[in-house]
Image (tube, rainbow, N blue to C red):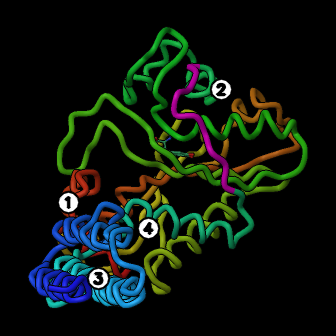
Amino acid sequence: MTLAEMAKALKDKALSSLATVADALSLDGFFSSYLSKKGEINSLMSKMKNVPPEEKAVFGAAVNEARNEVAHAFEEKKRALEEKALEEKLKRQAIDITLPGTSFEVGATNPYRLIVDEITDIFLNMGFEVVEGNEVETDKFNFELLNVPKDHPSRDMQDTLYFDAEHLLRTQTSGSQAHRMLEAKEKGPIRMLSPGKVYRRDEDDATHSHQFGQIEGLVVDKNISIANLRATLLLFAKKMFGEKRQIRMRSSYFPFTEPSVEVDVSCFKCEGKGCSTCKGTGWIEILGAGMVNPHVLEDCGYDPNEYSGFAFGVGIERVAMLRYGIDDIRRIYTNDIRFLKDFKSK
Ligand code: DAH
């Protein structure tokens, strides 16, 4: 075999070996066997020094041709393997778009919040401001400034949790009346609404909870009369329970109002004929109210000879239960998705 024939044979051997290469690892092996510095093609080339001068050109050309062809075939094989690898990777990572996706549950506003928003809206439209009170309150603001001195028997109706002798979880939102009046320092009229949580030592049942929500209302100005109270609450009842609603006031007792009233709204279920919602009376009690007691005005910095006012307190859950026909107050707190779903459209 001539040297040129040897070059051709090496080329054929390399090409047929390359044909069997099927992965990156054996391709590396192929490169070092044939094309690297110490590979077979280079070692054949190193025989050049022993070749007689007249054959050098033919031999050199044959080896170079072998190298070029093998190198070219090597590059092609490399590209083909890379493409194959990419295709396999894409196949592995393919997403089955026919599988069902993760669904997102859209929540619903709790009826408690719906009622707070609705009531505040009604009163904001009448020019009231919304103020936030303190859930941890002092004895002074929760009781004393509201005409309930220490040891007054009416405290028994509102027993609660005390932190120490002076600090407690508020039993009513009425304390924000005193805060607001003292802040105003007898300047100008007050029209305030104050929603929030209150706490009482109550046994929990279908209509009672140791924690519940109230909205306090207070108006203080010159020449405020019980007619203003009635007109304001009638408007509220109509907006809240329907245009046809009437209200009635029954006399009652609260230490911080004089006179005090319980306010009933005509039944919106039976239009006053008598049903289970109004217990056959045609009327539903919705809130307590009254004219601000002169002692309270005075203790909170207003001269009762010049100023008068009215106040009211609404139970948020009570309104929500009436409004949406909720049978148990505890449903409002347990966040059962099946219950809350009903309020999605509200
Ligand atoms: N604070 C009273 C309660 O918790 C509710 C109330 C009644 C508030 C009459 C008032 C009011 O402002 O005038 O039972």
Nearest to N terminus: mark 4 or mark 3: 3
Magenta residue span: 130-139
| Labels 2, 1: front one | 1
Residues at badges 4 and 3 in contact (C-beta under 8 Å)? no
Tell me, for residue 145, which label it has, or none: 2
Q: Is residue 278 visible?
A: no
Indicate whether 257 appears above or below 111: above
Q: Residue at x 13, y 78 (%)?
A: 21
When asked about the image quadrant of residue 146, the answer is top right
Distance from Cα at disc 4 to Cα at disc 2: 31 Å
Ligand 1 contact, mark 2 (Cβ < 8 Å) = no
Q: Which amino acid, mark 1?
A: Asp
Nearest to N terminus: mark 1 or mark 3: 3
Nearest to N terminus: mark 4 or mark 2: 4
Give the SS element for disc 3. Answer: helix
Tell me, for residue 74, which label it has, or none: 3
Q: Residue at x 30, y 60 (%)?
A: 38
Which residue occupies the extreme top position in the image? Answer: 165
Say left or right for 107 vs 94.
right
Magenta residue check for 320: no
Magenta residue check for 132: yes
Ligand 1 contact, mark 4 (Cβ < 8 Å) = no
Q: Which amino acid, mark 3?
A: Phe
Q: Which residue is mark 4?
A: 114
Distance from Cα at disc 2 to Cα at disc 1: 40 Å
